[in-house]
Image: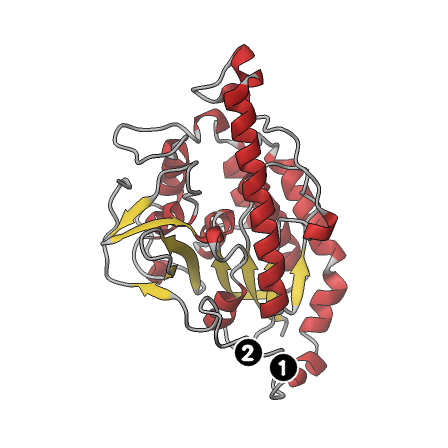
Amino acid sequence: MKEITVALGGGGAKGAAHIGVLRVLEREGFKIRAIAGTSAGGLWGAFYAAGFSPDEIERRMNAVDRTTLYQRRPGDGPAMLGLAGVEMLVRTNLEDCSFSDLRIPFAVTAVDLDTAEPVIIQEGNVADAVLATIAVPGIFPPRRWGNRLLIDGGVLDPVPVALARRLAPGLPVVAVVLSPPVKEWVTPSPPRLLASLPFISGYLSRMRLAQAFNIFLRSVDIAGAMLTDLRLEMEQPEVIIRPPVPHIGLLDDVEISEVTRLGEEGAIKALPQLHRAVSWLSRVTRRIPGSRRPIPVNFPYWRDGYAIVTGEQPQANGR
């Protein structure tokens, strides 16, 4: 049987590519036994783990008024934008779903802003966990969860390969990476969302505030791509799928169906790797001691360097 575990990486507006990847994996007969998600990967992974098919996820996203996604609400924590529309989308579809209700094991990553700890969320309300993993610092409000103030898991773990292995030990990890290798860097176009933001309109979109915001978003992309390359080199997923989405910026207003199609394109290109990863030879090789490069024990964010959030109640807004 072609069983795999999947690590879905962050990437903002690029995240719809995950829908296309999941569609191809299903169509080709791969059995997804667990999903680990970071940021946008946590959002789409939650929908899939809750039982929505890729086709249904795409239909629901196409019906969303995307101009409302990043509205702020009274009481939101410090950030340039809010997640009022995203929260409504998530809660409407996932309702009161908890991790124990999901059809496959699923977990997301976050980062404790006060302690710098990488955090795994795999218990409690799934919608609350999603809102924590997508809280890009400075752009979206942090999420208060018990005594922790959580931000986007991509700050330390852009593609959660180690977590995917933990969820389904012994299975090949398929990492879906939405950033290009740094050596092949492509600068995204200026965000097409700028003109629709509540604090930027008309001629203001050409002034320093918009230019500074664009520089900040590009720097986030660059740092994320560099950290992604480092962690992929260390953690060695059996398969890497890179949909051709480097031209898309973090907050671009995109056509969901087009980005989904690019995800399918990336997955189809990786099919030879996927079939090799589930072959009997690969299964035997993974059981041989030393077949995978060891992870340096003095690097704290691999292996057991995660805090696992359990039994804590999230609060609505970060302070």
The x, y position of residue 158, in whole percent, is 53, 54
Amino acid type, callout 2 = Gly
Label 1 with label 2: CB-CB less than 8 Å = yes
The x, y position of residue 83, in whole percent, is 39, 35
| Circle 2 SS class | loop
Residue at 63% in and 43% down: 260
Residue at 52% in and 29% down: 213
- Reading the image, the residue beneath label 2 is 170
| Circle 1 SS class | helix
Would you call the spot at circle 2 few (<14 residues within 10 Å), some (14-19), or many (20 or more)?
some
User: What label does residue 93 carry, if any?
Assistant: none
Instruction: Answer with the quarter of the image where residue 174 lies.
Output: bottom right
Question: Would residue 22 appear left or right of 60 to someone viewing this image?
Answer: right
Question: Would residue 170 appear left or right of 270 to someone viewing this image?
Answer: left
Amino acid type, callout 1 = Arg
Quadrant (top left, top right, bottom left, bottom right) of the N terminus = bottom right
Counting residues from the start of the chain, the first of labels 1 and 2 encountered is 2
Depicted 165 relative to depicted 50: above or below: below
Depth check: give the residue in front, 93 or 39: 39
- Reading the image, the residue beneath label 1 is 286
Question: Would residue 288 appear left or right of 146 to someone viewing this image?
Answer: right
Depicted 266 relative to depicted 100: above or below: above
